Image (cartoon, rainbow, N blue to C red):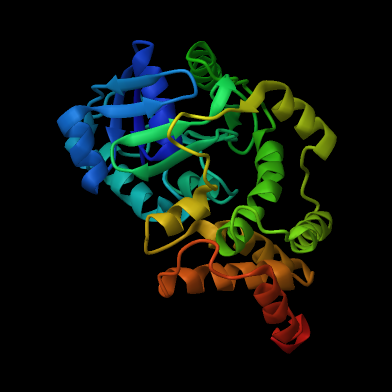
């Protein structure tokens, strides 16, 4: 197979880098200074144990590629960029190319399935950082991360079985799972804290807000009848295989939303994380004031170009107290 990594930032760069290192055909699709740096000097992949410089082919748009029946596309851009990316991919490749949604949230697979015949979900437990053009960090040992995957909405097939085998051979833990969306809904519960981390900083003591955000999500899951992996099973799977480790000269930063604010991007993926819970709450009559608050404040930080950690927990509490009730909206 030829692996096309569409949106080769932190997660995509780490996946593409490891596949390329092990001899697979890989093309990165990226843009701007990141693309220019990779073209000039290759992709730099740093881990706790090594620094690699990889001369991976890169393009800026899927229209620059000639697609074949051997191509597999990893979607690794942020969820707010998925719809535009899918339009470009559909125009360039048609509807037959396999699409693997290696992204946070649970809506990317639905977006992809509107156009593509073969869509796969992939749960991503991979501590990666991308804040410098041409450089991606993978802060994990002894494996790079967990990348289980399956057909959307359910099942497994020979293609995803081969993909997960390739990823496992490249230093990840990747299992074919016929109920992969259960894992993605579980991962969403963790990602609801991304906005809180970005808003209040890495060390903020905001445990009661984090708990409230999670409880709203669980209430929505119950109301909607959404199945997910129990917390104890999730902890056994993740903690048994992933150990965070330091990279010399690169202290571990925050998650994807934190990184977007650091890079000064024009958007964050909060609509597909906390916003997913807000949507479920609206559909099933469950109040979601804390998730709605984090969604709004994260957007405001982008609009005002504020750095991560620039709002205190106490300020966030006061904003919550000033919110109108759900019934007043």
Picture coordinates of residue 317, whole percent (x, y): 72, 75
The one nearer the camera, 173 or 185, is: 173
Measured along the vertical axis of the image, is residue 152 above or below residue 105? above
The residue lying toward the viewer, choosing from 200 and 235, is 200
- The answer to whether one can see residue 91 in this image is yes
Give the number of marks.
Answer: 0
Give the residue displayed 49% in from the left and 44% down from the top. 113
Residue 230 in view of the camera: no
Quadrant of image for the C terminus = bottom right
Q: Which quarter of the figure is the N terminus placed in?
A: top left
Considering only vertical position in the picture, is 57 above or below 79?
above
Q: Please, which residue is most extreme toward the front here?
A: 249
Q: Is residue 102 left or right of residue 278?
A: left
| Residue 172 image point, x, y percent | 55, 20
Instruction: Answer with left or right where residue 168 lies relative to residue 116.
Output: right
In percent of width and height, residue 301 lies at 48, 70
Give the answer, above or below, for where 257 lies relative to 147: below
Dividing the picture into quarters, in which one does residue 199 lie? Answer: bottom right
Which quadrant holds residue 318? Answer: bottom right
Snapshot quadrant of residue 73: top left
Residue at the location (76% across, 56% down)? Answer: 214
Q: Is residue 163 left or right of residue 234?
A: left
Residue 207: x and y in percent read 77, 58
Query: In front: 27, or 253?
Result: 253
């Amino acid at each position: 197979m030829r692996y096309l990594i569409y949106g080769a930032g932190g997660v995509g760069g780490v996946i593409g880098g490891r596949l390329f290192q092990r001899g697979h055909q890989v093309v990165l699709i990226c843009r701007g200074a990141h693309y220019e740096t990779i073209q000039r000097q290759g992709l730099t992949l740093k881990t706790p144990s090594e620094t690699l410089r990889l001369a991976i082919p890169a393009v800026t748009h899927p229209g620059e590629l000639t697609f074949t029946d051997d191509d597999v596309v990893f979607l690794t851009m942020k969820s707010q960029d998925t719809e535009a990316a899918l339009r470009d991919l559909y125009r360039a490749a048609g509807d037959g190319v396999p699409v693997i949604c290696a992204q946070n949230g649970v809506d990317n697979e639905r977006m992809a399935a509107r156009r593509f015949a073969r869509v796969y979900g992939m749960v991503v437990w991979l501590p990666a950082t991308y804040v410098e053009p041409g450089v991606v960090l993978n802060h994990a040992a002894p494996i790079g991360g967990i990348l289980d995957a399956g057909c959307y909405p359910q099942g497994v097939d020979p293609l995803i079985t081969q993909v997960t085998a390739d990823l496992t051979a490249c230093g990840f833990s990747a299992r074919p799972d016929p109920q992969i969306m259960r894992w993605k809904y579980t991962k969403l519960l963790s990602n609801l804290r991304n906005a809180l981390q970005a808003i209040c900083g890495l060390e903020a003591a905001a445990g009661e807000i984090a708990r409230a955000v999670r409880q709203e999500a669980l209430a929505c899951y119950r109301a909607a009848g959404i199945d997910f992996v129990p917390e104890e099973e999730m902890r056994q799977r993740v903690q048994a295989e992933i150990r965070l480790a330091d990279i010399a000269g690169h202290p571990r930063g925050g998650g994807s939303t934190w990184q977007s604010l650091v890079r000064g991007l024009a958007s964050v993926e909060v609509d597909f994380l906390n916003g997913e819970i807000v949507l479920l709450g609206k559909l099933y009559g469950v109040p979601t004031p804390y998730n709605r608050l984090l969604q709004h404040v994260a957007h405001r930080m982008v609009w005002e170009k504020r750095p991560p950690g620039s709002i205190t927990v106490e300020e966030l509490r006061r904003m919550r107290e000033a919110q109108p009730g759900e019934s007043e909206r």
